[in-house]
Image: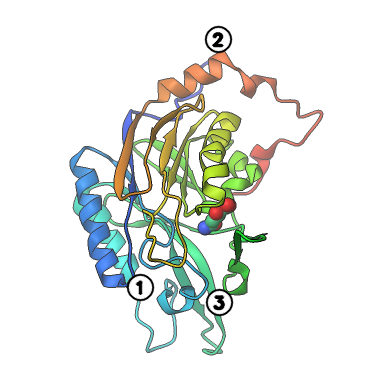
Amino acid sequence: MATSPPPLLKQPVKLACIQLASGPSKPTNLTHAASKVREAALTGAKIIVLPECFNSPYGCDYFPSYAEPLLPSPPPLETSPSFHALSAMARNNNIYLIGGSIPELVVSLTDPSSKTYYNTSLTFSPSGELLATHRKVHLFDIDIPGKITFKESDVLSPGDKVTVVDLPEYGKVGIAICYDVRFPELAMIAARQGCFALIYPGAFNTTTGPMHWRLLGQARAVDNQVYVALCSPARDVGASYHAWGHSSISDPMAQVLVEADENETIVSADLDGGRIEEARKGIPLRDQRRFDVYPDVSKAKVGP
Ligand SMILES: NC(=O)CCC(=O)C(=O)O
C-alpha cells in the first residue's frame, strides 16, 4: 500500500513579518528591532522575519560603512554586533528568527586591504544558534530611465547558493533576499526540497513595488504551492530610498492572507500544512511534471 509523504509543515505555526522603521543609527535600529520582535512573539508568532538591511538605510553609499564581519577577521575588527543582537532576540523570545539582512564585510586574512561586501541574511534557532546564512544571489542592478537606477554590484558581491533551512519543529523554509524573488528558478529549487514556505526579506521601492511586489509573492506561491512571506522596511520619505512597504503573506493558492500599507507594522498569519496539501490535491502539479521534457530541479545542489 502506498504511504503518503510526511507533511511539509509538521504543525500549524504563526509567522510574523515586522515592517520595521529604521533610521541611520545602527544601535537604535537594533534596539527597536528587538522591541518589535518581542511584540510579535507576544502575539504567539514562532517564526519572525525582519526586512532587508534592517539595521541601516538601504543604498550603495551605506553598505561599506554599516557592514560587519561575520567570519574571522584581522584585528581590530570586532565580531558583528548585529549577529549577537539577532541571536539574543531569537533566544530571549524562544522563536525562529529570519534576521532580515545586513551588509556583510569579508576581509582577507592575508591581505587586510582586500574587502568584499555581501547582502546577507542570518537565521537563528530559538536557542540563539545560527542555522543558516543566505547571501543575496541576484544583485539589484536596474535602470528605468527617469524613475530608478540602482546598481548593487557597484559595491556588493553576489552569493552563490540556494538556501533551505530546517526548522525542526515545523519543517523547511527557503530563504532569499528581495530581487532574488524575481528569479523563479531559485524559488523552485528551494521549494522542491520540501519547503512549506519561501521567505523574502526585501525592500522594493515606490516604482517597482506597486508594479510587481505583490504579484511576485503570489507568483512564487502559485508556482510552488507553498506559503510566501515578503517582509519590507516601513517607508521613510526622508531617506534616499523610498521602500514600498506592503509586507505580505500569501497562501499556497496564492491568496494574499495579509498585507501592510507603507507604515511600520507587524503582519502575521497562521500557516497550516493542510492548506498546502489541499492546494496540491486539487491542482496536482507534483504528479504531472514532465521530466522527459525538462530537467528535474529537485536534483539541484542547495545549502544551509
Ligand atoms: N532591494 C532590492 O533588491 C530591490 C528589488 C526591487 O525593487 C525590484 O524591483 O526587484
Determine which of the numbered discs, if any, sits on residue 1 in the image.
2
**Along the polypeptide, which appears first: circle 2 or circle 3?**
2
**Amino acid type, mark 1:** Ser
Residue 291, given in percent of the width and then of the height, sits at 76, 29
**Along the polypeptide, which appears first: circle 2 or circle 1?**
2
For label 2, count other residues whose C-alpha is less than 10 Å away and answer few (under 14), some (14-19) or many (20+). few
Q: Nearer the viewer, residue 247 or 112?
A: 247
Q: Quadrant of ligand 1?
A: bottom right
Does the rendering let one see residue 303?
A: no
Q: Please give left or right for residue 68 compared with residue 135 in the image.
A: left
Mark 1, residue position: 80
Q: Nearer the viewer, residue 30 or 162?
A: 30
Measured in 3D between alpha carbons, the distance from the residue under mark 2 to the one under mark 1, in whole angstroms, is: 53 Å
Determine which of the numbered discs, if any, sits on residue 60 in the image.
none
Which residue: 51% across, 89% down?
112
Mark 3, residue position: 116
Number of marks present in the image shown? 3
Measured in 3D between alpha carbons, the distance from the residue under mark 2 to the one under mark 3, in whole angstroms, is: 54 Å
Q: Please give left or right for residue 215 compared with residue 165 in the image.
A: right
